[in-house]
Image (cartoon, rainbow, N blue to C red):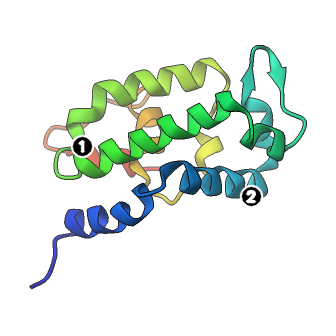
Amino acid sequence: MELSEPELIRQSWRAVNSSPLEHGTVLFSRLFTLEPSLLPLFQYNGQQFSSPEDCLSSPEFLDHIRKVMLVIDAAVTNAEDLSSLEEYLAGLGRKHRAVGVRLSSFSWVSPCSTCWRSAWVLTSHQPQRPPGANSTELWCKP
């Protein structure tokens, strides 16, 4: 029996989600390796981190990692109905833009990584979604 794409995604995610902080730390570690210029975007209490290691060991940043992994979990859980996350992700996109995050900051993410890109696309000055276009089509556009 062949599994559907959403079920394959959920199956893969279960392995990652068994240790979200560990896997989220790997994700951000890789992010800082690929895009070191993004480190200054992460500030807490007005303080910038001097190195990725300082950032990755900060209690505030570890909390951020947990939240990111929860958003990914919500997207995986709702893979058949991503539109249910639009309002939340739109607010998340506004918060990220307010602190200087740009869509180009997510260029390291694969083209259809819904959680990050959707939060941005939904709140940017894009034309209205064409009638009949589903959320995934909108979110996966560059």
84 left or right of 56?
left
The three-letter code of the residue at mark 1 reads: Leu
The residue wearing badge 2 is 34
Specify the quadrant of the image occupied by residue 5. Answer: bottom left
Specify the quadrant of the image occupied by residue 102. Answer: top right
Q: Residues within 10 Å of mark 1 (few under 14, many from 20)?
A: some
Specify the quadrant of the image occupied by residue 44. Answer: top right
Looking at the picture, does residue 60 appear above or below residue 65?
above
24 left or right of 13?
right
Q: How crowded is mark 2: few (under 14 residues within 10 Å), some or many (20 or more)?
A: few
Q: How far across and down, in percent of the image, does residue 22 sit? A: 58, 54
Q: Earlier in the sequence, mark 2 or mark 1?
A: 2
Among all residues in the image, which is located at the extreme right? 50
Q: How far across and down, in percent of the image, does residue 33 sit? A: 77, 57
The three-letter code of the residue at mark 2 reads: Leu
Looking at the picture, does residue 4 appear above or below residue 98?
below
Among all residues in the image, which is located at the extreme bottom? 1
The N terminus lies in quadrant = bottom left
The residue shown at (41%, 40%) is: 70
60 left or right of 5?
right
Looking at the picture, does residue 40 appear above or below residue 78?
above
Q: Residue 7 carries which label?
A: none
Q: Is mark 1 on a helix, strand or loop?
A: helix
68 left or right of 48?
left
Task: Looking at the picture, tell me which residue is in the foreground, 115 or 125.
Answer: 115
Task: Looking at the picture, tell me which residue is in the foreground, 16 or 9.
Answer: 16
Alpha carbon separation for disc pair 2 and 1:
28 Å
The residue wearing badge 1 is 82
Q: How far across and down, in percent of the image, does residue 11 sit? A: 28, 67
The residue shown at (22%, 62%) is: 6
Q: Is mark 2 on a helix, strand or loop?
A: helix
Q: How far across and down, in percent of the image, does residue 57 sit? A: 74, 40
